[in-house]
Amino acid sequence: MHADRTSSTRFSVPVDAALRSAGWQPGRWDIKQAEVWADTLRDHTSPAGHRHAVFPAAVEAWAEFGGLHISPGGTGRQIAPATLHLDPLHGLHLARTLGDLGRALDTEICPLGAETDTHSLLAIDAEGRIYTLDHTGDWYVGTDIDHALTTLIAGVEPRRLTTQP
């Protein structure tokens, strides 16, 4: 019996398959592109003077997953799987929105990409937690990039952020 060399234990089989078909593989690391995105975000100032926070958790997520267009097939567990484009420039003009969310959560928030079907913005905080922001509200997607990708690709409903205790 031969071990399946194409699977990993990091992600479930469907999530791993969606990531690999988008061009991801274990060890993928494009730090040059991540640094370009970091510089672009750092250099951008909104008309009202808002600036992006850039921190290691974001740069690491961009280096490993940045640029991927992920189109999972099938049905999700609770909701439709998300079609993703992991490019932080989707959030270039949302420095104020991300800054406001960061202040509400007592952390810094940086763009990560977008759910292209719903136009939701994916964002990451300084601790590596992942959120989506859309016209219906702000959502907590996972404790880190791996959990967030699993939630989004597998169609697990994220948890709404709320000011309620």
Image (cartoon, rainbow, N blue to C red):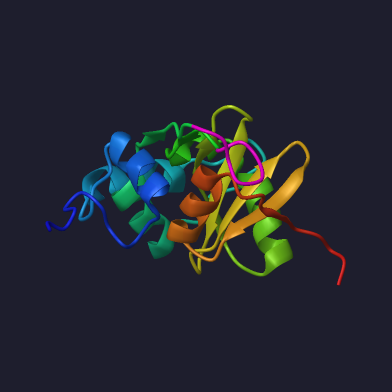
Task: Answer yes or no: is residue 92 visible.
Answer: no
Residue 136 placement (x, y as % from top left): 78, 40
Q: Quadrant of the C terminus?
A: bottom right
Farthest residue, direction right: 164
Can residue 76 be seen here? The reply is yes
Above or below: residue 135 compared with residue 103: above
Q: Quadrant of residue 80?
A: top right
Range of residues picked out in magenta = 74-81
Quadrant the N terminus occupies? bottom left
**78 inside magenta stretch:** yes
Locate residue 20 relative to residue 114 in the image: left or right.
left
- Give the total of numbered labels: 0
**What residue is rendered at 69% in x and 56% in y?**
101
Residue 56 picture quarter: bottom left
Q: Residue at x 41, y 45 (%)?
A: 14
Q: Residue at x 54, y 66 (%)?
A: 143
Percent across and percent down for residue 64 are 30, 51
Judged left or right of residue 112, residue 16 is left
**Viewer-proximal residue among 16 and 97:** 16
Return the residue found at the far top: 117
**Residue at the location (62% across, 47% down)?**
132
Residue furthest toward the left? Answer: 2
- Pick whichever, 44 or 10, lies toward us: 10
On the image, the x and y values in percent for residue 26 come to 23, 54
Majority secondary structure in the magenta region: loop
Q: Residue furthest bottom?
A: 165
Q: Is residue 79 above or below residue 62?
A: above
Which x, y percent locates residue 3? 16, 58
